[in-house]
Amino acid sequence: MEHNISLILGDGIGPEVISSVVEIIEATNLNINWEIVKAGESSIKTHGTPLPDYVLNGIKKNKVALKGPITTPIGKGFRSVNVGLRQGLNLFANIRPIKSYPGVDGLHKDVDFIIVRENTEDLYAGIEHMIGEDAAESIKIITRKASERICRYAFELAKKEGRKKVTLAHKANIMKLSDGLFLECGRRISEEYKDIEFEDIIIDAMCMKLVQSPSDYDIIVAPNLYGDILSDLSAGLIGGLGLAPGANIGEGIAVFEPVHGSAPDIAGKNIANPTSAILSGIMMLKHIGEFEAAIRIEKALAFTFENKNSKTIDLGGNLGTKEFTEEIIKHLEVS
Ligand code: NAD
């Protein structure tokens, strides 16, 4: 079966890690028609905007996209393309599996949980303004609709994946109305899923517990900002940002992308770890029903990790992005 998939290479290490996953998927001989579209800084030069309508329309048509990270200027400049895509396509759930891999020396060896991050509101709503010259105000939006939707998604995911517990992270002791509403929605939805354990925890305590005992967690559901911060913290538990994939899910549309950013400090040096992008690609293949190819890549990746000499530089090895990719493709043949 032929698949049309929108492909955004992204900025910084984006083109390196996305080319890696595309090469690997191509090596499985799947019939994929990659529709390459531009977003971010490169698109401002050609289209006068970082997120042209044709990109959003292309993804709406194809229903699936694979995306590299996009640089967002800090403190000024254009609004985040990532946030624009998530809001523009109503990609309400950001799913980020965090799993330790045999052969990779992370801080912990027994990690296997999924972060379900609300993806459309919270402080990311982008409503902020100056009050005079010396004060700034940013508005945190939490709605019942989006909170119930994401909590239900977390419980449905737990059911689908045979997970036993959903943990909701919040700061409702301080933000009694906004985080309080998120918590209230989680508690209400949990009533509909009696056979899945539910607990809530204050976000700061959660950070400590996650670092000390990550195997206590199964599915974590959180508002947008906490979910973002927890994702990088959790990647740190298993060996770093090179190992954390993600999927942005909406109504019939999904955009797959690594958790990490464009990493300008290592861009263009052939040293980025493409594993987050490859794992995002595996999630994408499962999403489009190509399980056989997904499992082949999964096995080839595991095989590569188990070989002491085939690690990327961030994991203490000496393979470049391209060489690591070649290694996986080699193992694809035998797996
Ligand atoms: P970053 O995730 O790009 O990098 C943080 C650190 O992790 C850096 O030291 C980097 O070298 C390292 N790192 C990241 N990915 C790696 C990989 N695959 N292999 C090895 N090392 C890796 O975060 P940042 O530096 O804060 O952000 C850079 C830019 O990316 C910013 O403009 C930010 O807005 C953007 N960003 C985009 C996305 C996205 O597109 N979804 C996500 C996060 C950040």
Image (cartoon, grey):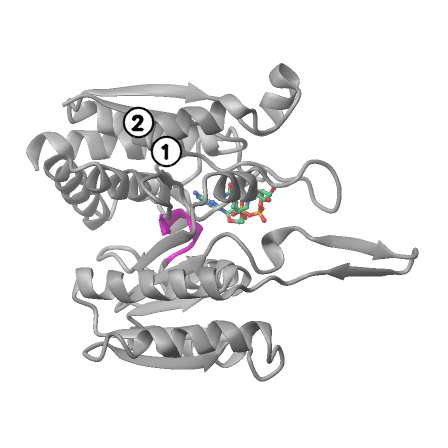
Which quadrant is the C terminus positioned in? top left
Q: x%, y% of residue 235? A: 41, 58
- The residue drawn where x is 25% and y is 62% is 156
Residue highlighted by disc 2: 22
Extreme-right residue of the structure: 133
Considering the numbered disc 1 on the image, is that residue within a helix, a strand or a loop?
strand
- Is residue 22 a member of the stretch shown in magenta? no
The answer to whether the residues at label 2 and label 1 have Cβ atoms under 8 Å apart is yes
Amino acid type at image mark 2 = Val
Q: Is residue 68 left or right of residue 132?
A: left
Q: x%, y% of residue 205? A: 49, 81
Which quadrant is the N terminus positioned in? top left
User: Does 12 sit above or below residue 190?
Assistant: above
The quadrant holding residue 326 is: top left
Q: Is residue 104 left or right of residue 127?
A: left
Amino acid type at image mark 1 = Leu
Considering the numbered disc 2 on the image, is that residue within a helix, a strand or a loop?
helix
Question: Under 8 Å from ligand 1: the CB of mark 2?
Answer: no
**Number of other residues with Cα within 10 Å of mark 1, as a class: few under 14, some 14 to 19, many 20 or more:** many
CA separation in Å, label 2 and label 1: 9 Å
Q: Which residues are magenta?
A: 239-245
- The residue drawn where x is 69% and y is 36% is 78
Q: x%, y% of residue 94? A: 40, 52
Decide which of 8, 183 is in the foreground and name it.
183
Q: Which disc number belongs to residue 66?
A: 1
